[in-house]
Every structure is written in structure tokens, then in C-alpha cells.
């Protein structure tokens, strides 16, 4: 999506989000299509099972869809997808249990095929279908899954240990194995849990073409292990901090072989106890009607902090800041070269919450700031670090974006008991490499940062995009995109964008939507919204075009304390979200109004769920001149 701005009315400035591409009304359903593939399978977590054979007479009724199938190492997978490109082009990808895309097909003909793809790992694989025509409501397809098995190699009894997650743990004192087998293109992993000061040694005796690697997984880049050594005999230590190291036996392409492996470790003498604590802050800018107001340095709450070896630059231990930006590591026993730093990362990583701010999709690096080097042999065993991340450093905005994601998480969790994790935000200070200004796609918010139009401190703009994410993960959004600027438009698009704007207002507790630019500050007050487009529908009919501003203003009036003529409702966000959570996702959902979930369906859900006074609701609907008829649905979900 592209961020667009329009001036309307006498002195009022409004902001809207516009999708790239031409607005298209949803096409009529194809009578030849028997059913949609399960419409909520838009993530791997909700993927629909795919069995061997052919599935036909189904359609993808959203932008993307996932199937899931279980394969074992040695399976050879072929996927054939057939569809009419005229109706909508579909791409296909196969994703392995580690989340890596191992094969794709993205042609422009009437079908796609992934031929003879070897399954290297045992586990659950996902087939991702992506409808490239964003403005096609549904595209019919058939899919055929064929699986054969390469039985030329039989794995050893230590399988499965093909991944770091499934690594075979080496017990206390070490271990020795003989007669192990590594099949072609496979990998065997072993985990050694070390204490500070330990030295580990491993020896491999193997057929030609097999190799031994010892490495540590740097918590700052877990998908890129830091290789310590690669040789028949490897040694590492004394390690500075306790934790796991990994051994990996790998084979050259196409090589199958046998090997023996021995692992042992001993405790080294010495070590220096160090206590490391401190606080992380960032420089915050507040957007007002007249521009930025510098609020000074505020706590970088819930951010990850690594203790870093100055000699290697590798993360040695990690903790998180609290809501005051403070952190404290347990006592560390330091070996080897002197010199410690802390590295604060714009990531909130907890058992149930995973948010991160990264510089761009290509490098995918978490935005971070690093302190000065502290020599514990000179300053003493207790080190207090104060890391202040400035706005000009190129990292301050990232910690503000992380704070907005956390603020949205806490707001939604308090109202619904649900989490909106995971969520990734891409942002680089001073640039806008995404072609959309600030937009949301598939659990990712892309944040523009150009000098003339920076969005990293535009709370309302960023929270609007997070509002789209909330609906995607906790409800359903049928919007197919299209141009919009606040004027009356497709009702499904209007509801999607109007809800996202309302979410930004609700989280901030402020009806004024600000967007900063160096030229001016764009603002819209939804408490006093009186633009002509924000009343009624284009045709006067229930399914007529409607403005997103009507949706936002109506929802704000229901949320806020009664203050306006005809505004007699004041309910919490949890009540307002209830129709999306309980009605939009119900099997008994009855689509009225326009095709797809829109404002009419939202009001139907409100009525079904008996969420508040009908008379008060009627007054607000009437005030907005919306022709809701209170005629449906005929049945309501439990």
C-alpha cells in the first residue's frame, strides 16, 4: 500500500492509505467453483492438510493460502498446480520444517509445478499458494501431490538430528559413537552444554566426503552459525559464558558415508566474575499539530540486550530490559580476552511475544545500538552501563517502533486476552525502499523513513498498519485493496481501512490522527468529523459505497465517553472487537451488504452478540446517515 494524503474541507487535513493498483469491485462468484479452500488458512499455523492425490474444484479466495503435509527424510515430492491464468495467476512455494523455502514456481502460464523436490528433513512441510492478482476475489485451481521415497540410504538410530533444534545432546563427560550413517545431502547435529571455562574437543573418523564442523549459534543471528572450526579434530574454549555449542557432520553433495565420532570436554582454571547491569533509553519525538516536540530520552522497554565479547563481537548472553529500560545479567564468569560491551536490539523476544524492527528484507538484520567497550580488569567486577540511543544515530526510531508494537500488544491483550505476535517492522532511517510509504503485508509493517516524510515517530500511521495486522491474526479481513482517499468507495475496503484508523485512535486514546512531514503536519479529528463523505452511502442503499471516515468516526463515538449530540455509548475496545472476533470468524456468518465483510456485517455482529443498547446504537447510525436496516442476520453464532 502507498500512503496518500489529501486536504479536504475548510482548513481540515485528512490522511488515508491508498493501495497501489486500480480499484476493482469484487467479481461475482464463479458458479463452476464448488467451494473455497479453507478461507482462514492464511498462515502456516492454520494450514489445511494436503494428502497424496489430486484435489480439484476448489479456489483460493484470498491473497495467499497454505497446505500442510508431513514428509520423512528421503521423500521426493512433486506438486502440480493447474488453473486458468486469465482468472488469476498463482505462484507456489514449498517450505521445509525449519521455515526455509526450498523450491518455488512463479511462471505466467496456466499452472505451476515443483518436480522431484527432495525432502532433506523429517517433519511438517508447507505449500504456499500466492494469488498474484490482488484484485481477483477467487481463482479456481486443482493441486496434485505425488510422493516417492529414496530408500538407497538408511539413517542411523540417532535420527532425527538433522537440525539444530533436533540436535542429539551429548551427556556429561562426553560420548563416543561408531558406525553412524550420513545419507546424501543430510546433516547430523550434536549439542554440547558447556559451563563457563570449559574446553570441548571432538574427533571424526569418516569416509571421504564427510566433514565435521564445530560452531556456536550467535543469538543475534541464529540462522548464521559462527563456525569455530572445520576439521577432523576440533577444539573450542575455554568458553567465556556457559551455553550450548554444536557439532555438525555434513556430507558433500550426493555423498553417503559412515563415521565414528568422539566428544569430550574439560574444565579450565581461572575466570573472572563480572556483574553487568544498566539502562537503555532512546530519544523520542512527539508529533503535535505544529510538528515534532523532543521529549528527551525515554526507557527502551522490553528490548533485548546482549552481553558482547569485544574481541569477537559475538553475543555471549542475553536478557531483556524491563518497562523502565533497566537490565541486569546474572553473575558472569569471564575467561579469555578482557573487554565487554552491551548491544541493545530492537526486539522483544519472549515465550509468547516476538516483535522485531529490522533494517530491510535483504539483510534482515535487527536494528541495534552498541555501547563503549568496558575492560572489567580495569574498572572492576561490577559494570554499570548507560546506553542512550539518539534519534540521529539511525537506531532511535527503531526502539520507538518497538515500543508501538509492544503498546499495541498490551492494549489488545488487556481487551481480548489474545496476542498479536509475531510481527516484524522494516525501517531504515532516511530511506523508503518499499515503494509504498508505510504499509502492511503478511505480518510485516514496512515503515517509510524519508527525510521529507519520516514515519517512525508517526504513532497513528504505524498503529494504523498494526491495526490491519490485528484483524489478520485475530479475525478476518476481506479487503482486496484498491485506491482510497476517504471518499465513498468499496464497502469492504472502507471497513478495513476505517477499522485500522480507529485502532490507531483507540490505542492512543486520542481522536486526532497526526502525520508529520517537514512541509506540514497532516491531521484529522474523528471526534468532530463532519466531512460530507463521512455521512451515508453513495447510492443511499445498504450495499452502497461508503467512506472509511464514516467507519472510523462511528467506532470512535462508540468507544469514547459520551460527549456529542446523539453519542450515548461508551464501551471498551474488547466489546467493539467482539463482532470481528466472534461473528466475522463464525461458521454461521451470513454475508449481507456488499460481498465480503463490511460495515453492514459489523453491525449485524453487534446485534447478534447483543453488545449494547439498540436505541443508542441506532442514534449513532442515524447521525452518520447510514441506512442500516436491523434486518439480519437470520441466525447468530453461539
Image: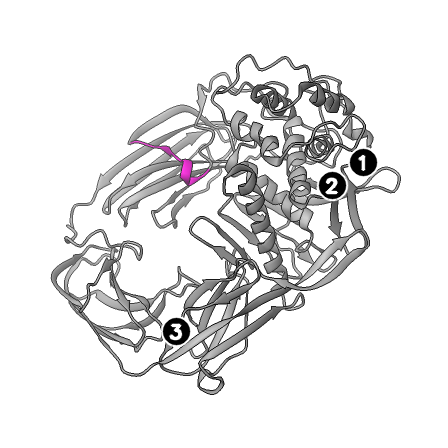
Q: Does the residue at mark 2 contact the one at mark 1 (Cβ under 8 Å)?
A: yes
> Is residue 221 visible in the rendered structure shown here?
yes
Q: Which residue is mark 1?
A: 528
Q: Which residue is mark 3?
A: 332
Point out residue 88 in the picture as x, y percentages from the top left corner. 52, 31
Please tell me how crowded label 3 is: few (under 14), some (14-19), or many (20+) other residues with Cα within 10 Å: many
Residue 147's image quarter? Answer: top left
Q: Which residue is mark 2?
A: 511
Q: Is residue 328 above or below residue 415?
A: below
Tell me the quadrant of the picture where the N terminus can be found: top right
Disc 3, SS: strand
Q: Which residues are magenta?
A: 43-51
Q: Nearer the viewer, residue 612 or 90?
A: 612
Q: Is residue 309 above or below residue 114?
A: below
Point out residue 558 in the picture as x, y percentages from the top left corner. 69, 31
> Is residue 537 visible in the rendered structure shown here?
no
How far apart, in angstroms, are the residues tagged by discs 3 and 2? 49 Å
Q: Earlier in the sequence, mark 2 or mark 1?
A: 2
Amino acid at each position: 500500500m502507498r500512503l496518500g494524503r489529501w486536504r479536504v474541507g475548510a482548513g481540515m487535513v485528512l490522511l488515508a492509505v491508498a493501495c497501489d493498483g486500480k480499484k476493482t469491485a469484487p467479481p461475482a462468484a464463479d458458479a463452476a467453483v464448488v467451494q473455497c479452500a479453507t478461507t482462514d488458512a492464511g498462515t502456516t499455523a492454520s494450514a489445511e492438510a494436503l494428502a497424496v492425490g489430486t484435489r480439484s474444484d476448489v479456489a483460493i479466495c484470498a491473497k495467499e493460502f497454505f497446505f500442510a503435509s508431513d514428509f520423512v527424510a528421503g521423500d521426493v515430492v512433486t506438486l502440480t498446480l493447474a488453473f486458468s491464468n486469465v482468472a488469476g495467476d498463482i505462484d507456489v512455494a514449498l517450505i521445509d520444517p525449519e521455515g526455509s523455502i526450498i523450491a518455488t514456481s512463479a511462471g505466467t502460464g496456466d499452472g505451476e509445478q515443483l518436480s522431484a523436490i527432495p525432502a532433506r528433513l523429517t517433519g511438517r512441510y508447507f505449500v504456499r499458494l500466492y494469488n498474484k492478482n490482488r484484485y481477483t476475489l477467487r481463482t479456481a485451481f486443482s493441486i496434485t501431490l505425488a510422493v516417492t521415497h529414496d530408500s538407497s540410504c538408511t539413517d542411523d538410530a540417532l535420527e532425527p538430528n538433522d537440525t539444530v533444534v533436533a540436535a542429539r545432546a551429548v551427556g556429561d563427560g562426553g560420548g563416543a559413537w561408531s558406525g553412524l550413517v550420513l545419507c546424501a545431502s543430510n546433516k547430523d547435529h550434536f549439542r554440547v552444554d558447556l559451563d563457563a571455562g570449559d574446553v570441548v574437543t571432538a574427533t571424526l573418523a569418516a569416509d571421504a566426503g564427510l566433514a565435521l564442523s564445530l560452531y556456536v549459534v550467535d543469538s543475534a543471528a541464529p540462522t548464521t552459525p559462527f563456525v569455530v572450526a572445520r576439521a577432523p579434530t576440533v577444539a573450542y574454549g575455554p568458553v567465556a559464558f556457559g551455553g550450548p555449542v554444536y557439532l555438525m557432520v555434513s556430507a558433500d553433495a550426493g555423498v553417503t558415508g559412515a563415521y565414528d565420532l568422539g566428544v569430550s570436554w574439560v574444565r579450565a582454571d581461572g575466570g573472572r566474575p563480572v556483574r553487568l547491569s544498566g539502562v537503555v533509553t532512546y530519544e523520542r519525538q512527539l508529533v503535535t499539530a505544529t510538528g515534532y516536540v523532543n521529549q528527551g530520552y525515554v526507557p527502551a522497554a522490553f528490548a533485548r540486550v546482549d552481553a558482547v565479547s569485544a574481541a569477537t563481537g559475538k553475543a555471549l548472553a542475553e536478557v531483556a530490559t524491563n518497562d523502565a529500560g533497566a537490565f541486569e545479567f546474572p553473575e558472569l564468569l569471564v575467561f579469555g580476552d578482557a573487554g565487554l560491551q552491551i548491544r541493545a536490539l530492537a526486539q522483544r523476544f519472549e515465550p509468547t511475544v516476538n516483535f522485531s524492527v529490522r533494517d530491510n528484507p535483504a539483510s534482515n538484520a535487527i536494528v541495534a545500538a552498541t555501547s563503549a567497550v568496558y575492560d572489567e580488569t580495569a574498572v572492576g567486577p561490577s559494570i554499570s552501563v548507560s546506553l542512550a540511543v539518539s534519534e540521529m544515530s539511525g537506531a532511535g526510531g527503531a526502539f520507538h517502533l518497538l515500543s508501538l508494537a509492544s503498546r499495541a500488544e498490551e492494549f489488545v491483550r488487556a481487551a481480548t486476552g489474545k496476542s498479536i505476535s509475531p510481527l516484524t517492522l522494516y525501517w531504515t532511517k532516511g530511506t523508503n525502499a518499499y515503494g509504498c510509504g508505510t504499509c502492511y503485508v503478511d505480518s510485516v509493517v514496512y515503515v517509510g523513513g524519508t527525510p521529507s516524510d519520516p514515519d517512525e515517530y508517526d504513532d497513528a500511521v504505524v498503529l494504523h498498519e498494526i491495526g490491519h495486522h490485528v484483524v489478520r491474526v485475530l479475525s478476518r479481513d476481506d479487503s482486496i485493496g484498491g485506491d482510497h482517499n476517504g471518499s465513498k468507495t468499496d464497502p469492504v475496503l472502507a471497513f478495513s481501512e476505517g477499522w485500522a484508523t480507529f485502532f490507531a485512535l483507540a490505542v492512543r486514546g486520542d481522536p486526532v490522527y497526526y502525520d508529520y512531514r517537514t512541509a506540514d503536519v497532516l491531521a484529522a479529528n474523528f471526534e468532530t468529523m463532519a466531512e460530507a463523505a463521512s455521512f451515508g452511502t453513495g447510492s443511499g442503499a445498504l450495499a452502497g459505497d461508503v467512506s472509511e471516515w464514516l467507519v472510523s468516526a462511528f467506532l470512535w463515538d462508540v468507544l469514547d465517553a459520551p460527549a456529542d449530540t446523539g453519542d450515548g455509548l461508551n464501551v471498551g475496545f474488547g466489546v467493539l472487537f467482539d463482532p470481528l472476533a466472534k461473528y466475522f470468524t463464525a461458521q454461521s456468518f451470513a454475508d449481507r451488504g456488499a460481498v465480503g465483510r463490511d460495515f453492514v456485517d459489523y453491525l449485524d455482529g453487534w446485534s447478534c452478540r447483543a453488545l449494547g443498547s439498540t436505541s443508542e446504537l441506532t442514534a449513532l447510525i442515524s447521525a452518520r446517515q447510514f441506512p442500516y436496516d436491523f434486518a439480519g442476520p437470520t441466525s447468530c453464532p453461539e
